[in-house]
Image: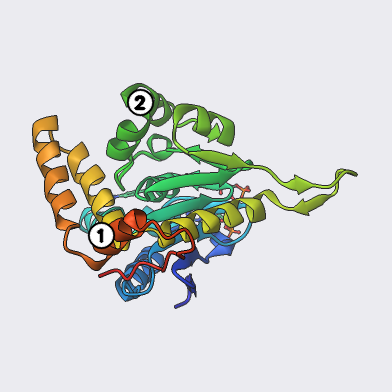
Amino acid sequence: MEYILYEQKGAYAVITINREKALNALNSQVLEELDATLEAVDLSTVRALVLTGAGAKSFVAGADIGEMSTLTKAEGEAFGKKGNDVFRKLETFPLPVIAAINGFALGGGCEIAMSCDIRICSDNAVFGQPEVGLGITPGFGGTQRLARLVGAGYAKQMIYTARNIKAAEALRIGLVNEVYSAEVDAEGNVVKSAQEVMLAAAEKMAAGIAKNAPIAVRNCKKAINEGLDVDMDAAIVIEEKLFGDCFETQDQQYGMAFFLDKNKDKVKEPFKNA
Ligand code: DAK
């Protein structure tokens, strides 16, 4: 792989979009490699993913404008489908995905972050949907996912104005869950950069998720995602089915037996994903 790094760290893995010279812009090759990386994740051992961008300056500065500039209508549609398919794969992936956002998350960069389950960022992060300034609409789900995440009012403001927002504003409107700053010592020297602090937090969160019962976590993701697309009556039925699906699993039986066991010296074993 030229543009994707994949590192498994125990029960979670970190995927890094590694095209730093172009600020990690998404061209066809990046999208194809990301798709292949997701296909190859070992679901028997990996229980959460972190998605980030190489370098401190940019998470993903959007779809590759150079590649897009010469596309015909048919090629544009094919490029859009490639992007949409991989973004949807992330969104419906059977593991939680945490976007660890460093620097620019513009256009397709903001959209790929929104396809992840959870977004956290460093304090230099910049978010925006600049597409209308380029003569196009957001095409990787931006008009849909941004409105669902932050509400139609802020989504319309961001999309119509094409104005970028900084990390603090992204936090205020609920686009990200947390913003991390550099760690400094008493003399004001940077001990850890904001990106290092943020990545460590993302990995800690992934490791924490990975300790919980995998089938239950997977079913929670499915219930939340699928439930948000239907009315409450149908959503509750989705929840019931996925709740029922956890029963008779080893993890449900072990988790409940562990709670009921009155032996104070017992030590919780890792869930078996079975
Ligand atoms: N594409 C290609 N190259 C990019 C890029 C991008 N989106 N963003 C940056 N680069 C490249 C620059 O061209 C430059 O390359 P060299 O000149 O060094 O070869 C290098 O990265 C460094 O960038 P700058 O020199 O511009 O760096 P600055 O610090 O001055 O500025 C910036 C950073 C992020 C403010 C600036 O690079 C910028 O404005 N970038 C473009 C951001 C943008 O507009 N992004 C949205 C792209 S549109 C579709 C589906 C989806 C989409 C479209 C269609 N369909 C369904 C069909 C999605 C569209 C988008 O994402």
Residue 123, percent from left and from top: 63, 41
Image point (71%, 52%), residue name: 193
Residue situated in front as seen by the camera: 60 or 42: 42
Q: How is the image coloured?
A: rainbow
Residue 71 in view (yes/no): no
Residue 47, percent from left and from top: 38, 65
Distance from label 2 to label 1 (Cα)? 43 Å
- Mark 1 crowd level (few <14, some 14–19, many ≥20, 10 Å Cα): some
Of the two numbered discs 2 and 1 on the same chain, state the one appearing first in sequence.
Answer: 2
Residue situated in front as seen by the camera: 270 or 33: 270
Residue 63, percent from left and from top: 41, 53
Q: Quadrant of the C terminus?
A: bottom left
> Which residue does the numbered mark 2 point to in the structure image?
156
Task: Identify the residue at the far front of this view.
Answer: 263
Disc 2 secondary structure class:
helix
Disc 1 secondary structure class:
helix
Residue 120, percent from left and from top: 51, 45
Circle on res. 252: 1
Dividing the picture into quadrants, the one containing residue 74 is bottom left
Left or right: residue 214 versus residue 167 is: left
Badge 2 amino acid: Lys
